[in-house]
Amino acid sequence: MKRFVSLCACALLMAGVAQAQSEDAGDLAKASQNPIGNMVSLPFQNNTSFGIGPDDAVSNVLNIQPVYPVSLSPKWNLVNRAIVPLIYREEVVPGTGSASGLGDISYTAFISPAKPGKLIWGVGPAFLFPSAQEDQFASDKWSAGAGVVMLTMPGNWVLGILAQNVWSFAGDAEAADINQMLLQPIINYNFSKGWYFTSVPVINANWEADSDNRWTIPVGGGLGKITKWGKQPVDLSLAAFYNVVKPNPLAGQGVNLDNQGETWTVRLQIKLLFPK
């Protein structure tokens, strides 16, 4: 009888631990999915795109995206977000060859309430620096603008939107002016044991381009999971996106091709998490 009671107690204890671990994974998933959460993270986001140009060229962009929140006061946080792109692109414009190297670095500083309510928000300046090493993906312009994030987390959902627009203000006088918007819907649903569905497409609008080559609009999604590598919490995700609207990368090159931008993108992300 005593052995039976001990076994029951042990089973209940293990069930309680498993439930607590599942709840912790769910909380960590939501924190990871909050772009202005009060948690240091280091994402490595790899985007491989297919079907670019008449020869179906491939590009690969590894975005290193550190997030570092700083407490400004008991009421306010400053969430520093940077994107450092490492780019490889096969030849798209005939005669130019392939190219690889560092792209233009972007940085956004979101000021956000330290203790938000049901609506989580942040707003702040955004910058784009002309750091690219290759002419094929260099803007050669210094740009600045503003960014805003709004999201909510009802139940298992994380729903929101991130938007920013930058305008060029200095740089190479012969380079094209920059007026571009980034719009990122955030749709995540969290299951048990750290698993989640994610759809976070990156919509771009180049306001300097003509209307036929202005928008890139992807649709798609994938799955992710919160796990651990040893003692290190890690957020892993894999998603695919199809561009229902895409620009012509050969516009202005004397080649008349419609909708020859990238067709598919596969995104693999490894995000190291450093919860407080």
Image: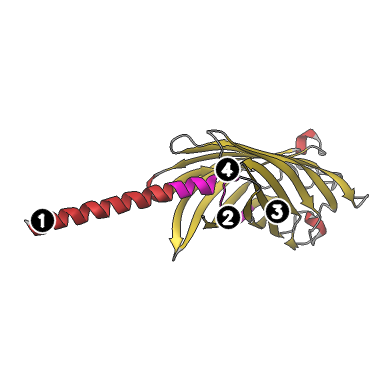
Q: Magenta includes 37?
A: yes
Q: What is the residue that sits farthest to the front in this orientation?
A: 74
Q: Name the residue under label 1.
A: 4
Q: What is the residue that sits farthest to the left in this orientation?
A: 1
Amino acid type, label 2 = Val
Give the Cα distance between marks 3 and 1.
70 Å
Who is closer to the viewer here, 223 or 79? 79
Q: Name the residue under label 2.
A: 40
Q: Position of residue 255 (x, y in %)?
A: 81, 46
Q: Considering only order in the chain, which callout, 2 or 4, is on the residue closer to the N terminus?
A: 2
Who is closer to the viewer here, 243 or 24? 24
Q: Considering only order in the chain, which callout, 3 or 2, is on the residue closer to the N terminus?
A: 2
State left or right for residue 119 relative to residue 174: left
For the point 62% across and 53% down, which residue is it? Answer: 67
For the point 58% across and 51% down, which residue is it? Answer: 266
Q: Considering only order in the chain, which callout, 1 or 3, is on the residue closer to the N terminus?
A: 1
Q: Magenta includes 255?
A: no
Measured along the vertical axis of the image, is residue 246 above or below residue 229?
above
Which numbered mark, 4 or 1, is in the foreground of this view?
1
Amino acid type, label 4 = Val
Which numbered mark, 3 or 1, is in the foreground of this view?
1
Amino acid type, label 3 = Asp
The quarter of the picture where residue 68 lies is bottom right
Are there few (<14), some (14-19), or many (20+) residues within 10 Å of tag 3? few
- Magenta-highlighted residues: 27-49
Give the Cα distance between marks 2 and 3.
41 Å
For the point 57% across and 52% down, which residue is it? Answer: 267
Q: Which mark is residue 55?
A: 3
Q: Which mark is residue 200?
A: 4
For the point 56% across and 44% down, which residue is it? Answer: 34
